[in-house]
Image (cartoon, coloured by chain):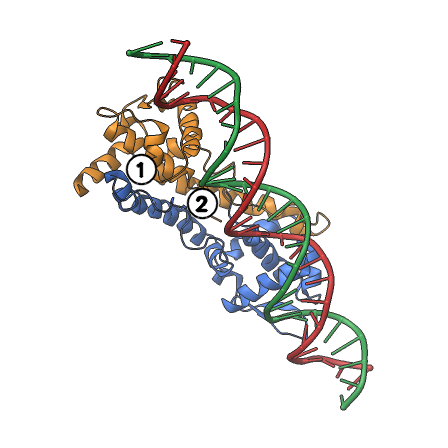
Chain colours: A orange, B blue, C red, D green
DNA sequence: CTTGTTGTAATCTTTTCGATTACATCCATA
DNA sequence: TATGGATGTAATCGAAAAGATTACAACAAG
């Protein structure tokens, strides 16, 4: 299984807000056209980003804006804001047989290693800011 | 979304084969009872592990055995064998608007960072052998 | 007050996974 | 060499999750 595209959509959305919000009203409809998704999906993601203090959005007036500099937003912040992974990345089989020595202890033995793997992945996401991405995007234009 | 439990089931299965195959016939039924899953699910996983050269299974006679020492099997080997992640860990939104500078370049900008994160996770899995897990399991018994 | 937005609930469809059924194939052994 | 216990695998089923979409109340600015 893969990590939800809410994450890449959220990053896309934030870069679009950064690039366009000074010259256009970056509404959910406008952003949805860039992402090529339904405006309601964008609104839900903006709602999560707002709750995380990453963007400002106001009902009625229209248009989202960044709540803090791109250099203060890491990929990990976005990843967490939109709940890309709910809790654990690896899904354990439920209810292994507790009467079997393996079944009884598999979780205790395996979980720490899987957590370490997940943390390593998340640590990489912490190393990248949206400012980095914006610069890389500029270089391509 | 989470990574399929096929992975943890496969690890569980291998440890159970290691622990029991000398004294019992480790059939799919026996293993299914330890994992608490359907025998067909176990057979499919054993089939993948067999294709990866990790176990030996023979139709008819019954019972799986390890094809190589636990110290030569890493969590990454198992993870790959059962296709825990098909290709990319992160799912990109398909078809961003190519007429938008962000939509046109988002993948090129973001993908390398996501790949790095995935590789970091997988690298951690490479650091752990089933032999390590077997020792940790022993310590708990 | 009117118009354009956001916020959010409710549905629907698609996809994926594991569970299960069914049965052909295989093989050790009696 | 027949047989009973296993494996291999296709086909279904039901549940869970995600994104798309519809609908509409709430809101803000002109």
Q: Is residue D23 left or right of residue A59?
A: right
Residue A77 point in image, percent of width and height:
38, 31
Q: Residue at x 71, y 61 (%)?
A: B30
Q: Is residue B86 left or right of residue B27?
A: left
The residue wearing badge 2 is A117
Element marked by disc 2: helix
Element marked by disc 1: helix
In the picture, residue A14 is in which quadrant? top left
Query: In this orientation, does residue B4 appear?
Result: yes
**Badge 1 sits on which subunit?**
A
Q: Is residue A87 above or below residue A47?
A: below
Q: Residue at x 40, y 35 (%)?
A: A79
The residue wearing badge 1 is A34
Instruction: Give the mark nearest the N terminus, 2 or 1.
Output: 1
Residue nearest the observer in this picture, B18 or B33: B33
Mark 1 residue crowding within 10 angstroms, few (<14) / some (14–19) / many (20+): many
Mark 2 residue crowding within 10 angstroms, few (<14) / some (14–19) / many (20+): many
In the picture, residue B38 is in which quadrant? bottom right
Closer to us: mark 2 or mark 1?
1
Residue B88 point in image, percent of width and height:
40, 51
Residue A5 point in image, percent of width and height:
42, 41
């Amino acid at each position: 299984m893969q990590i939800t595209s809410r994450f890449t959509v959220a990053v896309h959305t934030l870069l679009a807000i950064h690039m366009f919000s000074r010259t256009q009203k970056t509404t959910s409809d406008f952003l949805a056209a860039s992402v090529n998704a339904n405006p309601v999906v964008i609104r839900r993601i903006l709602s999560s980003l707002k709750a995380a203090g990453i963007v400002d959005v106001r009902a009625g007036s229209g248009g989202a804006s960044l709540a803090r500099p791109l250099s203060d937003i890491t990929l990990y912040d976005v990843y967490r804001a939109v709940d890309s992974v709910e809790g654990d990345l690896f899904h354990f089989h439920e209810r292994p047989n507790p009467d079997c020595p393996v079944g009884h202890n598999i979780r205790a033995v395996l979980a720490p290693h899987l957590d370490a793997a997940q943390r390593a992945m998340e640590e990489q996401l912490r190393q990248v800011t949206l400012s980095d991405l914006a610069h890389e995007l500029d270089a391509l234009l």
